Image (cartoon, grey):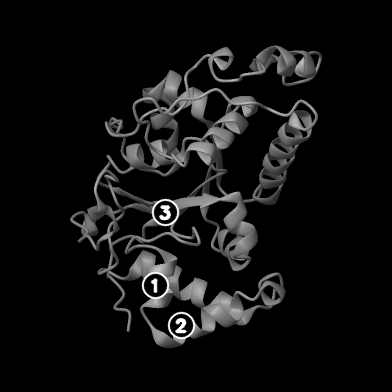
Amino acid sequence: MIHRIQMKGQARKFVLLTTWRSGSTLIRLCLNSNPAVRCHSEIFLKDYPAADGFKAYYEANMWRNLLYHISENHRLRKRSYNFGMKWIVKRFLYSLYYNPTFSAPWADMTTDAWKEYKHRDNLHIEKAVGFQLMYSQLNFYRPLKDWVVGQNVYVIHLIRENVLKLFISRVVAKETGQWQFARAGSRRRIQLDPNTILVELDKIINEREGIRARFQDNRYLETTYEAFLSDQCEESRKIFDFLEIEQSKMEFPKFLKKINPDSLEDIIGNYDEISMTLKGSPYEKFL
C-alpha cells in the first residue's frame, strides 16, 4: 500500500530526456546538488540494479513480477493497449512521486553502496522530481510516452551537438566496457567504418528531430552538453528557471571523468580516411 505524502504544493514532474553518451549523468548529479530537486538515474534501464529502479519495484512483488514478464513479451510490448505494462509503469511512477519511503537517487557510483536503499533527507522541500529517460526506453516502455504527454511533464531535452564525438564515445564505451569512469591506460585508438559513418550520424540526427516533434506541446527546454560545459552558471540558471526552482550553484561531481581525449586525431586510428569521408557533409565541422 502506498501512503501518499501530503505536500503544500505538488512537486513538478520532469524528465531529463536524452540518448546515451550525451552527458546526462553529469547534468543529473549537478541538478541534485540543489536540495529542492530530486533527479533519479536511468531507472527504466532494463538491468538497472539500484533500489530506486523499475526493476527493483516489480521484482519486489510476486504478482507485479509475473505481470511484468507476461507484458514484456515483444508482441505485447509494441501494442498501445498493453494494459499490464501500463498498470505497472503507472504504479511505479506514482510510488516514485508520492511514496515518502521511495529511495533517494544514488550520488556516488564508486562503491557498491550506490545500489542500496537510501532515505530521502530533503523529503519535505522537494519542488521538482524527475529522472533520466533515454530515447530507447520510450520505445521499450511504450506507456511512458503517454505518461509524459498526458501528465504534461516538464521535458529537459539534453543533446550533444557534436554527433561525431557522441558516436565515437559510444564506440569506445562498448569496446572498453567503461561508461562513467576512466582508468589508467584505458584509452585506445579505434577504427571507424567509412562506409557506414554517415548513415550512423544521420540516424542520431533523425532520432533527435523525432523527439523534438513528439514533445513539442509539453513544457520543453532544450540544452546542450557543450553549452553546459562552457557556461555552467548560465545553463544551470536556465534549467532552474524552467523548473521554477530557486537558483543555487550546481556542483560538479568529482568522481566522473571523461573517457575520451578532446582531440579526435588522438582516438580515431583512421582519422585521415574518416576526414575525407565527412568532407563536404554537415558533419565536417565536428572534426
- Residue at (57% x, 75% y) in the render: 86
- Pointers 2 and 1 in contact (C-beta within 8 Å): yes
Which disc is residue 64 wearing?
2
Across and down, in percent, residue 196 comes to 77, 33
- The residue tagged 1 is 57
Q: Earlier in the sequence, mark 2 or mark 1?
A: 1
Location of the N terminus (image quadrant) = bottom left
How many angstroms separate mark 2 from mark 1 (CA)? 8 Å
Which disc is residue 130 wearing?
3
Across and down, in percent, residue 25 comes to 41, 41
Across and down, in percent, residue 22 comes to 52, 36
* Mark whose residue sits in front, 3 or 1: 1
Residue 228 seen in the figure: yes
Q: Earlier in the sequence, mark 3 or mark 2?
A: 2
Q: Report the residue that reaches farthest toward the bottom.
A: 63
Location of the C terminus (image quadrant) = top right
Q: Earlier in the sequence, mark 3 or mark 1?
A: 1
Across and down, in percent, residue 134 comes to 55, 50
Image check: 77 left or right of 7?
Answer: right
- Residue at (51% x, 52% y) in the render: 133
Of 84 and 247, which appears nearest the observer? 84
Could you tell me which secondary element the residue under label 3 belongs to?
strand
- Residue at (37% x, 61% y) in the render: 49
Could you tell me which secondary element the residue under label 2 belongs to?
helix
- Residue at (28% x, 41% y) in the render: 34
Type of the residue with mark 3 = Gly
Image check: 41 left or right of 163?
Answer: left
User: How many marks do you count on the picture?
Assistant: 3
